[in-house]
Amino acid sequence: MRYLHTMVRVTNLEDSLDFYCDKLGLKELYRSEHEAGRFTLVFLCAPGDEELAKARKAPLVELTYNWDPEAYEGGRNFGHLAYAVDDIYAVCQRLKDGGVVINRPPRDGRMAFVRSPDNISIELLQAGDALPPAEPWASMPNVGVW
């Protein structure tokens, strides 16, 4: 048995791709349209994992967009996606500059949480050792839930 992907239902494909790709930095590997089932699947991977993901040796995020509108609730019940990042402060600043709320700032130089447009929690973890605490993050309060 091996881990293949995590599926997340999204309500607006363009907003979700803007968040996951343009802001968070994931890469779109491929997508498929299913007219009979009225849905689109978009598979994403972490930067640098493209070749491993194509060979099914790295996990993917599958965005599922149902063409007929549905209300999805309980994003928090899903849990979260987690990504290791090289510089948590730089990633959080890029996200903040892109209009993303940093729900749990990286006060400890190690961990932060943000949410997708569909309220899916995304955990960001500093790769390796935690960075030294730094402002403005060290004194930034939590916002909402993650």
Image (spheres, rainbow, N blue to C red):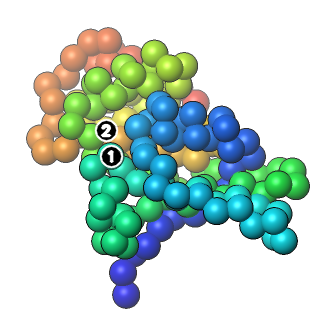
> In the drawing, does residue 70 fall left or right of residue 86?
right
x and y, in percent, of residue 99 in the image: 54, 19
Residue type at tag 1: Pro
* 103 over 118 or under it: above or below: above
Between residues 103 and 18, which one lies in front from this camera angle?
18
Q: Where, by quadrant of the figure, is residue 139 drawn? A: top left
Circle number at residue 111: 2
Label 2 – label 1 distance at C-alpha: 19 Å
x and y, in percent, of residue 43 in the image: 52, 58
> In the drawing, does residue 40 fall left or right of residue 16?
right
Q: Where, by quadrant of the figure, is residue 97 drawn? A: top left
Between residues 2 and 71, which one lies in front from this camera angle?
2
Residue sitting at x 68%, y 44%: 13
x and y, in percent, of residue 34 in the image: 75, 67
Between residues 132 and 15, which one lies in front from this camera angle?
15
* Residue 78 seen in this snapshot: no
Circles 2 and 1: CB atoms closer than 8 Å: no
* 76 over 55 or under it: above or below: above
> In the drawing, does residue 109 fall left or right of residue 2?
left
Residue sitting at x 88%, y 55%: 68
Circle number at residue 47: 1
How crowded is the residue under tag 1: few (<14 C-alpha within 10 Å), some, or many (20+)? few
